Amino acid sequence: MTLSPRRPRRRRPAPLIGSLALATGVGLAVAPAHAATPSADRPTAAAATIVVAKDGSGAYTTVQAAVDAVPANNPSTVTISVKPGTYRETVKVPANKPHIRLVGTTSSKNDVTIVYNNASGTPKPGGGTYGTSGSATVAVEADDFQARNLQFVNDFNEGNTGITDKQAVALRTAGDRIVLDNIGALGDQDTLLLDSASKDKVGRVYVNNAWIQGNVDFIFGRASAVINKSAIRLVKRYDGSSGGYVAAPSTAAGKKGFLFINSNITGDVSSRSFYLGRPWHAGGDASLDPQAIVRNTDLSAAVKTTPWTDMSGFSWKDDRFSEYKNTGAGSGAASTDRPQLTDAQAADYEIADWLGGWQPSS
C-alpha cells in the first residue's frame, strides 16, 4: 500500500497529558470527588471512595458489589479502591455509571487481579453461549472510566477440547474517554477488546504503561486507542506452537484506529512467527476501514518480515496499516509489504491527534 504524501504541518505542542504523568508511566493522582447536593433533577452522588477488600476490611468484598453501589447517572467521580488480592468474578460497569475510577491500593499492577475464565463458547446458565464480547472478565460500557494499578485476566484454558470458540476477553471497553494506566491485560486469544458503543460513535482510549499479553488478535476492536509506553507480550498457543497476530482493528471509516507508540513487542516465541496485525471487518462489513499504526516501538525478532496480513477475504492493503521509525530485530525498511510514514505524515499520527481534543486528567 502506498501512502499519499500530505502537506507538512507545524508540529503542535506536547499534549497536557505529559504534565499529568500519563506519558511518563507514573500513575494518575485521583482527586476526591465533591458530593453533589441532591435535588429533584440531579442524581445523588455516591461516596467519593469505596473500599473493596477480600478480608472484609473494606465496605465490600467484591468489585461488582462496589460498582453496584454507585448510583445510576452518578454526576461526580467515584474511586473504587481495591486492596491486594485475587478477585475471581466477572464485573460489569454499565453505561449509566460514568466517572468511576478503579484503582489498586499499591503501585504494582500485580497486587490486584480480577480474573475469570469464560470463553466465547462457554455455555451460559440460561442457555446459549457467551460470545466473544460476553466472555469479558471485566466489561466497561460507561464513559469517563479509569483503571490503574491492577490487572485484568482471563485464564480460560485454550486446551479445553469441549469448547470450540476459544476467544476469551480479559477486559472490554465500549465507552469514550477511557484511561488504562499501569494495568495488565492477560489472556490468549482476544485479550483486550477496545470498542465503542456503536459504529457511529467514538470510543477514545488511552493506554499507558500497560502489560498486554496474548497470541491471536489480542488487541482488537473499533476504538480510537493509543497504546503508549507499554509492554506487548507474545505467548505461545496451548499446544506449544508459536504464531499469531497482535492487533485486529475494526475501525469505522473516517475514524482513528490503533496507535502503538513508544512501546515494545516481544515474547518467548519462535522467530518471525507473529504478525503485527490484520484488518477485522466485523460481520463482513466492507464499509469499515481498519487502521493500525506502529511507531517508535521496539520490535523483537518474533515479528514477521511481512508484518501485516489479510483477514476473512479482506486485504490489509485496502485499509490503513503502516509503521514509523521502529527499532529492533523485527523492524524493517519501507517496501510494498511494509508501508512507512514519512516525517510529514508522522506529524499527524501523534497522541494528541488520536485523542481529538480530549486531554486525559484526574
Image: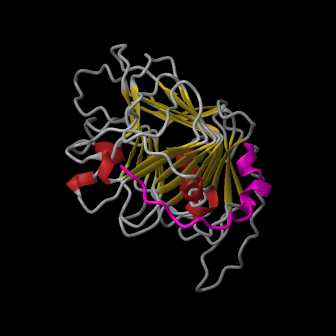
Outermost top residue: 240
Main SS, magenta residues: loop
Residue 15 within the magenta-colored segment of the rendering = yes
- Quadrant housing residue 86: top right
Q: Give me the residue at 59% from left, 32% from top.
A: 327
Q: Give me the residue at 76% from left, 69% from top.
A: 34
Closer-to-camera residue (204/346): 346
Residue interval drawn in magenta:
1-25
Where residue 146 sits in the image (x, y, percent)? 62, 54
Where residue 238 sits in the image (x, y, percent)? 36, 18
Q: Give me the residue at 43% from left, 64% from top.
A: 255
Q: Is 229 above or below relative to 10?
A: above
Closer-to-camera residue (242/2): 2
Quarter of the figure with the C terminus: bottom right
Query: Is 159 on the left or on the right of 139, as rendered?
Result: left
Where residue 57 sits in the image (x, y, percent)? 72, 39
Can residue 338 be seen here? The reply is yes
Residue 51 within the magenta-colored segment of the rendering = no
Query: Is 221 on the left or on the right of 80, as rendered?
Result: left
Where residue 346 sits in the image (x, y, percent)? 57, 54
Can residue 362 be seen here? The reply is no
Closer-to-camera residue (132/239): 239
Colour basis: secondary structure
Q: Is 148 above or below relative to 177?
A: above
